Image: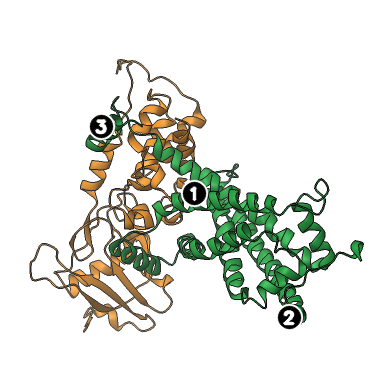
Amino acid sequence: MINKSTQKLDNIEGYREIDITVFRYSSQVKDSKPEFQTYRLVETPGMTLYIALIKIWSTMDHHLSFDFVCRAGICGSCSMVVNGKPRLACKTRTNEFEDGKITLLPLPTFKHIKDLSVDTGNWMNAMSKQMESWIHTKEVTDISAIEKPIEPDVAQAVFDLDRCIECGICLASCSTKIMREDFVGAVGINRTARFAIDPHDERTDEEFYELIGDDEGVFGCMSLMGCEDHCPKDLPLQSKIAYMRRKMVKV
Amino acid sequence: MSQKESTVELLTGKDCEGKKSRIPAKLDWLQSVTGLFLALFITFHILFESSILFGKEAMYKLTKMFEGEPFIEGGEPLIITALAFVIFSMFIFHAFLAMRKFPDSYTEYQRYRTHRKLLKHSDTNLWFIQITTGFAMFFLGSIHLYMMMAEPEKIGPYASSDRIFSDWMWPMYLLLLISVVLHSWVGVYRLIIKWGWFDGKDPRKNRKRSKMIIKTLIALYLLLGLASLTAYMKIGYEHQDDYGSRYISENHK
């Protein structure tokens, strides 16, 4: 069944109609059966998937669930699978799909909540704790003093890895993660790399080995580069995973 | 590792000092080392095998060289047996290590397969080629290597061609050629990415460059291998009435 938008704007000539097919399922409801539902709506100029989904939600189906916060590619909440590729919905324009047919799925590998909504937050929180994602130092911090300076190039490299928005797209693009639930993925390995290159952190390679030195960590990675090729923030995952692998194999 | 240490790891996932095992690091490194060794071997093997394109005499002389003829009169095929044994051992060890990465249950395979089809991602597809060709070579590679170990004296312009054509080994060699060329070069590409060998200042650009070079090498080696196989087939076809007779070097005529 195709639901149709009833907005007045739909009558404007020259705008094409697009079909958005959405995975519908509620893991919280016992009798819920997975199905695909198609919504037909008029594509407006500059329309993103965020705008399209809001339009569906407000004019056609108030029961449709999906996650958004910032709408600007910063919060990482709106990641979903768009025609097979994990992407941020707020950064995906509908006009890039020439045939006007878009299929949306929730991100695999995360706990499914309802329709396009998944729980990335709890997984990311657990990963952060598992990777001990904080500066480890014996130095007592004096917050009234200026922080220990580091080379600008090093600071830039640390900031570069800190740009991760924990959207989960690297995990949803990774065959290892798809097969092996316990794999920590590029997001976890990137996190250790961020602290490994930060001179404020005094951890040794032996200590980092305790975090990622197994098949659930860096040695589980098969270098298929789904993470690198789909990361919406263009993080240097390829080179940083290789960097941590080289370090860990020498321990 | 002692029984006590193994038991502690079984129960805690760590060693007696409370540290993670170093074995996963060693296995990962060894998988790469054995793979690289085998890929290098294949690179030269296919080149040497193509000596038949320069004529029977060229192939004969190369075969005898590998049998140590400059030092041993008439050559010693047992050298080939020893070489094949080393390669076979390395091959089995590499297969043992690489098997860790295979999907090992219906669930893993189903999830991998469906995800791969949805994602349509080139490097993920390349890995599918690697596991498929790797699986095929468990059998194809073993047949070839065992034959080389057991009958090392049956290598030569006529002996090899008879085996390929009259003994109907060509379908096996054709499949083995395709599998080994794809598996080796895709494996080398994977090693380049995995260890960041040629990352340089622009890892992304160098990855694209590496992939392009690897694709070219795959095409070249497939062409070279197919040309050699065709040459052996032609010689085998022409020699079928004298099946079993050996090539006599022009120097000995």
Choose between A87 and A217: the one closer to the eye: A217
Drawn colour of chain B? green
Distance of label 2 from label 3 (alpha carbons):
64 Å
Q: Which residue occupies 86% across, 64% down?
A: B249
Which residue position holds label 1? B93
Q: Label 2 is placed on what type of residue?
A: Gln
Residue B174 in the image, given as x and y percentages of width and height: 61, 72
The three-letter code of the residue at mark 3 reads Val
* Chain painted orange: A
Query: Circle 3 is placed at which residue position?
Result: B8
Q: Position of residue A151 (x, y in %)?
A: 50, 26
In the image, what residue type sits under mark 1?
Phe
The residue mark sitting in front, 2 or 3, is: 2
Question: Which residue appears at 67% of the width and 56% of the height?
Answer: B43
Q: CA distance from mark 2 to mark 1?
A: 38 Å
Q: Residue A196's quadrant in the figure?
A: top left
Q: Dot 1: within a 10 Å radius of its alpha carbon, few (fewer than 14), some, or many (20 or more) residues?
A: some
Above or below, A152 against B61 in this view is: above
Instruction: Give the structural element (helix, strand or loop) at label 2.
Output: helix
**Structural crowding at the residue carrying mark 2, measured as other residues with C-alpha within 10 Å and reported as few (<14), some (14–19) or many (≥20):** some
Query: Residue B240 — which label?
Result: 2
First in sequence: mark 2 vs mark 3: 3
